[in-house]
Amino acid sequence: MQKNRFPVNKRIWLLPLIVAVFSLFGISSCKEKAPKGSCIALTKSQIIKAWEKSGHLKNIDYLTFITCYNPISHEIHTGVQAYNKLYQPIGSYVNLTTGDAWNDTLPPVAVGKNNLDFVELDILDKTGNLKDFAYINLEPFGDHGYLYYNTNVVDNKNKTLNLRPYTANPCPPCVNCKPPCPAGCTPACDKADSTKRKIPPYDTLIDSSGTN
């Protein structure tokens, strides 16, 4: 059974993040419509505008998705920032679009932070240029009070290009944080968080009967 409350220590730790996120949403409004059939979308055109044109595309090490979710109104707002190997933000912060496939099945998480290694998406060719695709689709889900994203690369015919979803893991727990948590797992990270393992790959989340 999933926990219905987002732990208090995590909410306190994420307060500065909440302030920063709402500031970013205010100055970077979303003008692009979500692709039909998408859940939460990061489009190729957004990637080009935010990171390719500025020359940052080849230097991206990982992406951090920041989510504000209102469980009362069932509204979700997600943005993404690119980082290099030195944990420095590069390029523009991008507001993602919410599509018609969004279905609210989340625990009451006020704000979430998820990291995904850029190389896992496999959207660059051997020369470092973007491959042919339409958008990256994010499907949020909850596990033990944490917010996760399954991410898929989708082409112009709405076909998923990757064999299985890539998981954007939450921080906290500390094992998923970038840069890594300081020794002693601070700030506001309890023992359970510091030892919590990453969620298994999507294709292992099938029970013994072979059904989801």
Image: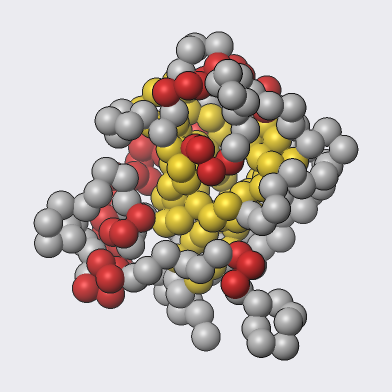
Image: 176 above or below 33: below
The answer to whether residue 130 shows anywhere in this view is yes
Along the line of sight, the residue nearer the viewer: 209 or 23: 209
Within the image, what quadrant is residue 5 found in?
A: bottom left
Horizontally, residue 169 falls left or right of residue 195, namely: right
Image: 7 above or below 156: below
Along the line of sight, the residue nearer the viewer: 31 or 155: 155
Residue that extends furthest to the right in the rendered view of this protein: 157
**Where is the C terminus found, in terms of image quarters?**
bottom right
> Residue at the location (34% across, 70% down)?
196
Residue 44, x across and y down, in percent: 67, 27
Residue 32, x across and y down, in percent: 70, 27
Tell me the colour scheme of the image: secondary structure
Within the image, what quadrant is residue 81 found in?
A: top left
> Residue at the location (45% across, 56% down)?
169
> Residue at the location (28% across, 75% down)?
192
Horizontally, residue 177 falls left or right of residue 209, namely: left
Residue 208, x across and y down, in percent: 66, 87
Image: 20 above or below 194: above
Residue that extends furthest to the front in the rendered view of this protein: 126
Within the image, what quadrant is residue 36 found in?
A: top right
Image: 56 above or below 18: above
The answer to whether residue 22 shows anywhere in this view is no
Residue 143, x across and y down, in percent: 50, 71
> Residue at the location (83% across, 42% down)?
158
Q: How many numbered discs?
A: 0
Along the line of sight, the residue nearer the viewer: 42 or 157: 157
